[in-house]
Amino acid sequence: MIHIPRAEYTRRRKALMAQMEPNSIAILPAAAVAIRNRDVEHVYRQDSDFQYLSGFPEPEAVIVLMPGRQHGEYVLFCRERNAERELWDGLRAGTEGAIRDFGADDAFPITDIDDILPGLIEGRDRVYSAMGSNAEFDRHLMDWINVIRSKAHLGAQPPNEFVALDHLLHDMRLYKSAAEVKVMREAARISCAAHVKAMQASRAGLHEFSLEAELDYEFRKGGAKMPAYGSIVAAGRNSCILHYQQNDAVLKDGDLVLIDAGCEIDCYASDITRTWPVNGKFSPEQKAIYEIVLASQEAAFAEIAPDKHWNQAHEATVQVITAGLVKLGLLQGDVDELIANEAYKAFYMHRAGHWLGMDVHDVGEYKVGGEWRVLEVGMALTVEPGIYISPDNQTVAKKWRGIGVRIEDDVVVTKQGCEILTGGVPKTVADIEALMAAAR
Ligand code: GLY
Ligand code: MN
Ligand code: MN
């Protein structure tokens, strides 16, 4: 299995600590277990920031980073080994495993955190944490601080500054290393295979969930634990619902089906959308819309390179889509004016992409100092223009209504431009029709 090597987690912790102010401490909790219903739990997924710094996959754990500490800069609080619990729920690293297998300099049982952590914080000037994102942990942190404050008369020195960790950490996460790109390529490769499988299986009379099953099968077979987000399998008019997830309608002859799905490998997401005709052959109207979306995506790729800013790719898609809709008579007027007054938003109401990484909508600022961010090597993003003609749109001829097309690929910015990670699934009308014909 392709995964992030242990040395990379060490490097990340060191890089973060190098950016922290002198005499400071960073504290991050693992994700909590989420209850699905009664005693049934959701599949556990580690918090992305916690995973990024540790690779430690268990709940009930806390990372403590103390740059410059003589007795070890990286302390991990985690669950102790417990034969009874491990019999029921699976193996735990325990404190020994945290040191041996996960590079902690020191490890303590999570049950001792209230006794130990105030002593680690005491005397440090600044505390870095993800303030505001985990109310329960914020309360704990204040409890630990108050323990120190209550001992001020004995000479204890509580920290005076509380700093959001997000800014430093999320900027680091925005730049993908070679190892991260490798994992993202693998997630993309498996997701491409899944889309191909779904395309080949597409038949009128099946359900949206029939194609979802093909995706899930390929994801799991490839070693992915789960999709990176709820798969969207939207046939016919459902393709015009941007976050459709019901996935239970019948696939009808003559309709399109839009699938937006990607798996996650070692906590790195892929995010692919393809749209194809259920019966394997585009109608003239479907093809006309599809070609505009595809051309707009090509125009966007050309705007992704180190010297371009974040919004240039989006602007390129708006230009091509608006001009295309005018040409088909779906919008009337001057292209520049239709862009200026945002008339295109009746058909294209979302942005052309987002950062991609450990979170499908990954962290990282889109603007810096009020200006669109300039792209740099290693940034990963999606390119996903679309046209959605509402089934209720009375301003267009009936034959156009209910057509929804999105095409989405994942890219990483390179010195020359960008690398498309998700090229392994057909995208042109001819290639999709050929693949589907061969599967019939
Ligand atoms: N699948 C979510 C997105 O495309 O942004
Ligand atoms: Mn996306
Ligand atoms: Mn998507």
Image (cartoon, grey):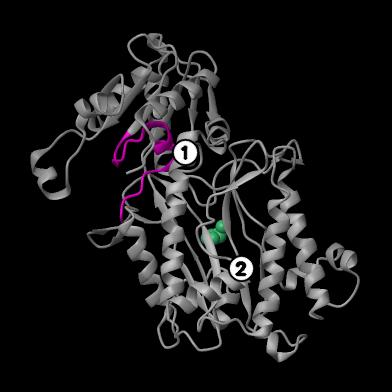
**Eye-nearest disc, 1 or 2:** 2
Q: Residue placed at 12% from the left, 37% from the top?
A: 82
Mark 1 closeness class: few <14, some 14–19, many ≥20 residues within 10 Å:
many
Compared across the picture, whether 224 is left or right of 290 comes to left
Relative to 343, does residue 186 appear above or below in the rendering? above
Q: Who is closer to the viewer here, 136 or 299?
A: 299
**Amino acid type, residue under disc 2 in the picture:** Thr
Name which quarter of the figure residue 120 lies in: top left
The residue beneath circle 1 is 180
Relative to 214, does residue 3 appear above or below in the rendering? above
**Amino acid type, residue under disc 1 in the picture:** Glu
The answer, for residue 343, to whether it is visible in the render is no
Q: Residue placed at 40% from the left, 71% from the top?
A: 212
Q: Is residue 51 magenta?
A: yes
Q: Answer yes or no: disc 2 within 8 Å of ligand 3.
A: no
Relative to 151, does residue 289 appear above or below in the rendering? below
Q: Position of residue 227 (x, y in %)?
A: 40, 58
**Image region (quadrant) for ligand 2:** bottom right
Image: magenta residue range: 43-61
Name which quarter of the figure residue 267 lies in: top left
Work out which quarter of the rendered image holds the N terminus and state it: top left
Q: Who is closer to the viewer here, 432 or 333?
A: 432
Secondary element type, mark 2:
loop
Name which quarter of the figure residue 5 lies in: top left
Q: Who is closer to the viewer here, 426 or 72?
A: 426
Give the numbered dot on residue 428.
2
Spatial CA distance of label 1 from label 2 is 29 Å
Q: Who is closer to the viewer here, 421 or 264?
A: 421
The answer, for residue 159, to whether it is visible in the render is yes
Q: Position of residue 83 (x, y in %)?
A: 8, 39
Q: Is residue 256 magenta?
A: no
Secondary element type, mark 1:
helix
